[in-house]
Image: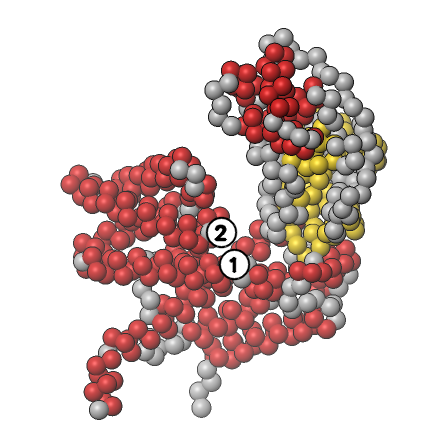
Amino acid sequence: MKINRVAVLAFMLCAAALSVMYFKVTRLGLPLEPDARSSVWTVEARASFRGEGRIKVRLALPEKPPGFDILDEDFVIRDYGIAEEYVDGQRTALLSTRSARGPQALYYRLTVNPREIPRGSPEPFPGYPPVPDYPELYAPAIQTLLKEVRTHSADIATFARQLILELRQNSNDPAVKLLREEARTPLARAQQVADILAGARIPARVVHGLELRHGLLNARLEPWLEVNNEQQWLPFNPETGEQGRPENFLTWQTAPGRTLVVDGGRDVDLQFSVRRSEPRTVELARELDQPLAQVSLLGLPLHVQNTYTILLMVPFGALLVVLLRNVVGIRTFGTFMPVLISLAFRETELLWGCILFSSVVAIGLALRFGLEYLKLLLVPRLAAVLIMVIILMLLLSIASHRLGFERGLSIALFPMVIMAMTIERMSIVWEEHGPHDAIIQGLGSLAVAALAFIVMSNAWLQHLVSLFPETLLILLAMTLLMGRYTGYRLSEYWRFRSVWLSDKS
C-alpha cells in the first residue's frame, strides 16, 4: 500500500497546530472567541525623529479621559530617562538622554477600559475668559458675527452650535468669508471658534483625541471643541457643529500646545495605533514568560501587530481562491489578483469597491481598445494603460467628492498595477476568445474578490489568527490536500449536465 506523503504531511501540520492551540487555551487561558463586552483598548503612540545629540522629549499624556478608565501604561524605550510633570495643567512625560544620533523611535503604550460617563455630574468651572484683543482686520467681522449668532440662540450650547454653522456654511456674508479664509486647517478652525466664543465670555477649549477603532494604523490626533456651560464641558464637532463625541473617542490632550515637542531632534512625527484585545491577552503581553507567548505577536509594537493581523488574513483569501478555482471551477484573471482587490475593499467597503473597480476596468478596457490602432509594443502599451488607470482613478475621486460620495476618495488605495494588468489581460482574452469569455472571467474575478473580502473581514477569524497564528499551518495542510485534487469541478457537472441526465434516464 503506497503511503500518501501529502496526506501524512497535512496530518502532521494539523496535529502540530492543534497541539499549540490546545496549550494556549488550557494553560495560557487565551479565548477562542472574542468577547466585545470584556474587551479593552490598547493605544500605542510612536514618536519618531532624528537625533542630533542631547535630546529632550515632551509628550502630552492623557489623564482621566472621559468615558475611559486607565488600566495600565508604560514606555518602550532604551537609554532615556523618564520623568513626569504638569505643564499648564496637562500631564506630560519628559524623556531625556545625553547622546542620541540617527533615527529614534519612542513608544508609549496605554491600556484603557470603556465606562459610562455619569450624566449631570458637575465639573470645576474654569471661570469666564477675558475678551481677546482681536486684530483690527478681524474685530468688526467677529463683533458682527457674534450679534448675528446671539439672535439665533437660546443658551450656551445653541450659541456654540450656531456659531460653528455660521462659519462653515457657504455664506455670502463678507465677515464670514473673511474669517473662513483666515483658518485653513482643522486645528486652526477649531481654535478660531474657541477664540470667537471668548469674545462672548464663553469658556471654550480645543482638545485633541483619537477615535478608537480596531486595527487603526498611523493615525493622528483630531482636534475637538469643548464649551463650558458653567456646569460641565460640552463637546462639539468643530466642522459640523454636532454636539457630542464620536463613539470610543479617547481625549488625549486638553491643554494648548503641541502634543510632542523634541529639543535636539528634527523630522519629528507622532503616530498612533489602536487594537482591541481580551484582558487575558493584555496580561500575557505584559508577562511574556511562557516560551510560546514570546514567539507571538504580543511582544511586537502595536502598529506591527495590526499590520500582521491584515497579512495573516491573506492566506484565508488565498485558500478561498484555490477552492473556488480548483474545486468549484470559477474562472478569474490571475491567481491572486482577487485577494489583492479584496484588500483594497477594506477602505472602500464592498459595495463601493465593486462599483469603483467595475467602472475603472470598463472605462480602461475601452481606452485599451483605442490603443490597438497605435500598434504599440507590449511594455509601452502596459505603461500607457497604467497611466490611464491612474488618470481614471483621479477623475473618479474628484467626481465622487463633488457629488458628496466620500467613499470614492478611497479608490486611490486600489492596486494600480494589478488593475492595469487586469485590463490588459481582459483585452487579450476579448480578442482571442471573444467578449463572452472576457466578461465571464472579469465577473468571476470580482465575485471571488467579494467573497474573499467577506472571509478576510470576519471578526472571529481575525481574532483567531492574531492569537493563534499557528492556524496558518492548518490552512497550509488544506492547501496541500487540494493541490492533489484531480476530480471534476462543480462547474463541469453543470457543463455536462446533459450527459448526467441521459445516463439517469
**Image-based side of 390 in relation to 499, left or right:** right
The quadrant of the picture occupied by the N terminus is: bottom left
Image quadrant where residue 65 sits: top right
> Label 1 neighbourhood size at 10 Å, few (<14), some (14-19), many (20+)?
some
Can residue 97 be seen in this snapshot?
A: no
Seen from the viewer's position, the closer of residues 268 and 6 is: 268
User: CB atoms at circles 2 and 1 under 8 Å apart?
Assistant: yes
Q: According to the image, label 1 marks what residue?
A: 457
Residue 117 makes an appearance in the image? yes
Look at label 1 and name its amino acid: Ser
- What is the number of the mark on residue 376? none
Q: Secondary structure at mark 1?
A: loop
Is 16 positioned to the left or the right of 177 in the image? right
- Name the N-terminal-most of marks 2 and 1: 2
Q: Residue at x 61, y 52 (%)?
A: 214
The residue lying at 70 percent from left, 50 percent from top is 42
Compared with 19, 394 (above or below) is above
Q: Residue 493, position in %: x, y?
A: 29, 78
Which mark identifies residue 346? 2
What is the CA distance from the residue labelled 2 to the residue labelled 1? 8 Å
- What residue is shown at x 57% (from left), y 32% (from top)? 239
Image location of residue 477, percent across then percent down: 50, 72
Q: Is residue 289 above or below residue 163?
A: below
Give the quarter of the figure containing the C terminus: bottom left
Measured from the top left, where is residue 299 in percent x and y? 70, 54
User: Could you say whether the residue bearing mark 2 is in a helix, strand or loop?
Assistant: helix
Residue shown at 41%/49% (left/top)? Answer: 352
Amino acid type shown at disc 2: Arg
- Number of residues whose C-alpha sits closer than 10 Å to that of mark 2, classed few (under 14), some (14–19) or many (20 or more): some
Residue closer to the observer: 200 or 94: 200
To which quarter of the image does residue 408 belong? top left
